[in-house]
Amino acid sequence: MTLVQQHFALVPTMIAVDNLLLFRAQRNRRTSRVTAAADLKALASRLGFEIDVTATVAAMSVGERQRLELLRALDADPEVLLLDEPTAVLTDAEADRFLAVIRRLAEDGRAVVLITHRLREVVVAADRVAVLRNGIVVSPPAPVGSRTRATLAHEMVGAGLPPVGRTSTSTGRRVVEITDLRAGRLTVDRLVVNAGEVLGVAGVDGNGQAELELALTSLVTPDSGTIEVGGADVCGLHPRQRVACGIAYIPSDRAARALVGSMRCDDNLALGRTTWRIRRDPSAGARMAAWSIKGAPHHLARSLSGGNAQKLVAARELHGDPRVVVACQPTRGLDPAAATQLRQSLLAFADRGGAVLWIAAELDELLEVADRIVVAFHGRLSESFLPPFDRRSVGLALGGGE
């Protein structure tokens, strides 16, 4: 049996092929690095993935790590495969190829358990479907064709989801202005995000989004250029200073960049908000309740599910009065109700005059929430797409087409 978890089980300091060799050694299958590299490349090609077998995991984006996790699991040729949100940061095309592979595994007599919130994947890949809500099986396994998507969605959340609509509230006042930025593979000549605006950054993971995320949040210093927030250049500042500059941050990797799993939830809510030591906020319980976070202030953050952990991050970052929210894959791995709540909270922030820079791999989400969309491809950002969005044109830009 092989398990692919939401939180990756990779060794950050090791390169991709060595992570595969380590996994093979755990199963008493020892091969040379050359053989493992060739096998990894062949399997990636079969799935239509791109992977640098010599890159360290620490240097990979979240999407690239997800691909490596999936490749490592399939390399084991498992009899039983357990998958927890395996396509959360894959594009639709990559997800479809992966689902076709696990479909073939099932047809060959393997058992596959797919845990997902994406109903499209259930319909495409599954034979039977069961629904869990709040830790309880509310709908036992039954043939997929016996339920409609609407029925499944209702069973998942227990009620209808409110629509998430977007009417632009942009004031035209610049909050973020990026000029002549060079950071690794990323080049940005000029990019502006206005007050009251949601700017969506679309693209297949690995096209410069990670560099944009890290530069905006002071986690890396760009090679050149300026990033102004509220008129002040934030390049080169210590990450602690981003809060004082009004930058809120929901990272693509909450476990590595947002939460300390061994600390209490209320302490995590205070991170970055005090100057010399943790001061527990007496309102932490009320804030967790407002976000429907299942847990208590004294619980350790690592005890939370992925969705509840993400809501804890959002509850901290949206508290107070930031100027801009940098939201990177903010709904990754969330159930429909939690994803809707987080989207509505970010849109409400924009409605109050905040600026949102929303980086996501899911084009459908950006088409729903954004006022403008730019596409990242090979480290460059496209010209802005404006509503009403032409999905075909945006989709062509994702592949570098015109």
Image (cartoon, grey):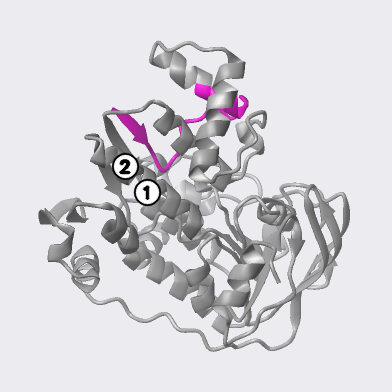
To which quarter of the image does residue 17 belong?
Answer: top right
Residue 280 in view in this figure = no
Q: Quadrant of the C terminus?
A: bottom right
Kind of element beneath mark 2: helix
Where is residue 183 drawn, in percent x and y? 80, 51
Quadrant of the snapshot with the N terminus: top left
Q: Is 19 in the magenta?
A: yes
Residue at (42% x, 80% y) in the render: 164
**Left-right relation of 90 to 127:** right
Task: Choose between 154 and 205: the one closer to the eye.
Answer: 205
Residue 27 shows up from this direction: yes
Seen at 70% across and 51% down, the residue is: 214
Q: CA distance from mark 2 to mark 1?
A: 6 Å
Residue 249 point in image, percent of width and height: 60, 58
Q: Quadrant of residue 52?
A: top right
Q: What amino acid type should be assigned to the residue bearing mark 2?
A: Arg
Q: Is residue 141 left or right of residue 372?
A: left
Badge 1 local density, few (<14 within 10 Å), some, or many (20+)?
A: some
Magenta: main secondary structure equals: loop
Amino acid type at mark 1? Ala
Q: Quadrant of residue 387?
A: bottom right
Magenta-tinted stretch: 1-20
Expressed as whole percent of the image width and height from the top left, the position of residue 178 reads: 81, 67
Specify whether 129 is left or right of 186: left
Q: Confirm or deny contact between disc 2 and disc 1 (CB under 8 A).
A: yes
Identify residue for label 2.
Answer: 104
Label disc, if present, on residue 100 of the rendered structure: 1
Residue 326, compared with residue 1, is above or below; it is below
Q: Residue at x 64, y 61 (%)?
A: 399
Residue nearest the observer in this picture, 134 or 247: 134
Any magenta on residue 337?
Answer: no
- In the image, residue 115 sits, relative to residue 338, either above or below, namely above
